[in-house]
Image: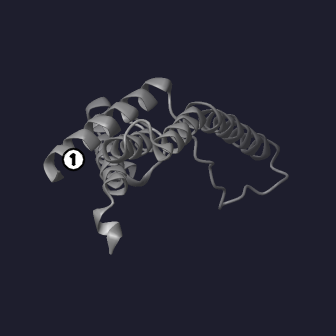
Amino acid sequence: MDILYNFPLWSALLAILVAQFIKIPLAFFATRKLNWSLFTSTGGMPSSHSAAVTAVSTGVALEHGLDSSIFAVSAVLGVIVMFDATGVRRHAGYHATVLNQLVTDFNRLVDEVKTWPKKENEQKLKELLGHQPIEVFFGALLGIVLALAFHAIVA
């Protein structure tokens, strides 16, 4: 049961939970609508992926030092995850937006022509996949702060 004492792992899990929960009140203040589904959604402020990878790296640094090989691995993988969140995943969201608009336009054309039946079970692609750089920054900052606070409490 050594996993129960794995500080970097628990720091990352805590960071994910806190980051996902924070999305709900932030969205409420912006839209005045309470959306609990944000707790399990991707994208948005702050980035829970960034919070998780920085919490892991901070936890590893606290336990093994900044000169350890395991810190190097966690830091490099963290940078890759954060780069992916602002690059590939964000652009995949842009593509989903364009494809959803194409489907809407196509269905409008079909309705106007009245020669093809409209599909009842069309599904839209998820558009909020990645993060803006500021969302990744605040997710990373949240992960570091949470890991340091968690370490101060449990150490």
Q: Residue at x 51, y 44 (%)?
A: 69
Q: Which quadrant, please, contains the N terminus? A: bottom left
Tell me the element at label 1: helix
Instruction: Give residue 97's quadrant in the image.
Output: top right
> For this rendering, which residue is in front, 7 or 47?
7
Question: Can the viewer see residue 118?
Answer: yes
> For this rendering, which residue is in front, 60 or 133?
60
> For this rendering, which residue is in front, 11 or 100?
11
Q: Residue at x 37, y 56 (%)?
A: 9
* Left or right, 58 with reference to 107: left
* Left or right, 90 with reference to 111: left
Residue position marked by numbered label 1 in the rendering: 150
Instruction: Give residue 113's quadrant in the image.
Output: top right
* Left or right, 91 with reference to 49: right
Q: Residue at x 62, y 49 (%)?
A: 124
Q: As shown in the figure, which amino acid type bears the numbered disc 1? A: Phe
Say above or below: 131 vs 118.
above
